[in-house]
Image: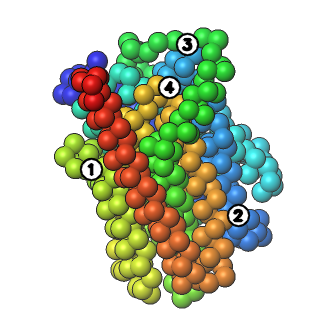
Amino acid sequence: MIEIKTSAYRRASFALALGSFLVFCNLYMFQPMLPLMAEKFNASAIEINWLLASCTFTLALTLVPWAIGSEIFGRRNVMMLSLFLLPFAGLAMLLTDSLLMLTLVRGVMGISIAGFAAVAVAYMAEEFTPKALMLAVGSYISANSLGGITGRLYGGFITEYWGWEIAVIGMAVASLLGAVLVNRLLPEQLYFTQKKGQFRSHNRQVVCHLKQKKLWLAMLIGGLNFAIFVNLYTVMGFRLVAAPYSLSISLTSMIFLCYLSGTITAKISGRWSQVYSPIKGMLLGTTVSALGMWVAAYDSLYTMLIGLLLISSGSFFTHSLAYAWVSQKAETAKATATALYLVHYYVGGSLGGFYLIACWQYGTWNGVLAGGMVIYGLIYLLCWLLQRCTVSQRKEDEILALKETNPVV
């Protein structure tokens, strides 16, 4: 298996990080454009949110089918097909002439992205040693945040000065070149076992994963965490382009540099889980994120930026731990398990956008605070339930081990 500090580890971790960077650039390129696109299509904030939500929603819906396909055709093949589809889905957006058609093509983009997102961690779980896996997942999620930052900054600046069509063309070219490089660097699979003709078995695995509380609770935590995190940025974008700030799209897109704090904490999460409880780490990350939302309530650009830094730090820390938890605790069909986590994650992001934007439209930032605390409260509850489930499972395992050792007990 791939060990830390080897040539294979460096090649594989870089290739996976680059692939992650590309898909998240494509996924979030439109987020800073939303206020401008709302003007272009004469749409409300909730209506224009479909440009982001359609992509994340179709991404969520197709994760499990991609994961099941990877059990048959191989993780690497699915990832590479996904990456090479990206530039074609991107260029197809140039053929649209209405908000509805653009939204539909963005949905196709989500399907393309889902292939890589669904199986990358499963590839790592099978090919990397346990220690290398935790560090590689941290690097992979750090690349998620870097891709999100770059895509948003790129989308904001290029759109303001040259138009969204030029932004789409440039991203398509970069995606094609990146896919070629990933294909050259990513090692072939050595520990993957192909499973043909087991479609019903894969469906049973989906049900089996959802029945395991230790997995499903972590999936719900990931979904709610993403629902609040990504959409606080969307709402902040609308806040900054409106009076009294009236910032340009390019300047507003600079807030996504605050994602860099999440890049750092995603890396730290891998080391945290080797020493401390992942569940306590999820609680810590949630607390830091909630604190950031309250700090951002003050009407000052400086406090808003500090708040966003805290939100990113806490949210990425929680996400990294929950994601790795599902990958480790799933005893079989790891690709399906990680895909199910991402289904919850992106459905949360899609639905959370409409929820928080409604809070913003009807209650400004005070409405966002109230709505946000409901979500944070649910995450705290889920962490408590996950801790109880883990302790209960540990006691059952200890009793079972004792009975096997001493049948008289």
Q: Judge by depth and name the residue closer to the eye, 206 or 145.
A: 206
Task: Name which of mark 1 and mark 2 comes first in the sequence.
Answer: 2
For mark 4, give the secondary structure.
Answer: loop
Tell me, yes or no, if residue 275 can be seen here.
Answer: yes
Dot 3 corresponds to which residue?
Answer: 195
For mark 3, give the secondary structure.
Answer: loop
Task: Name which of mark 2 and mark 4 comes first in the sequence.
Answer: 2
Tell me the quarter of the picture where residue 325 sits.
top left
Dot 4 corresponds to which residue?
Answer: 333
- Residue displayed at 35% across by 61% down: 283
Q: Amino acid at mark 2?
A: Ile
Q: CA distance from mark 3 to mark 2?
A: 42 Å
Q: Which mark is residue 48?
A: 2
Q: Which mark is residue 402?
A: none
Q: Is residue 9 above or below residue 118?
A: above
Q: Position of residue 138 (x, y in %)?
A: 32, 43
Q: Position of residue 125 (x, y in %)?
A: 38, 28
- Residue displayed at 54% across by 79% down: 370
Left/right of residue 389 with respect to residue 133 in the rendered view: right
Q: Is residue 298 above or below residue 339?
A: below
Q: Amino acid at mark 1?
A: Ser
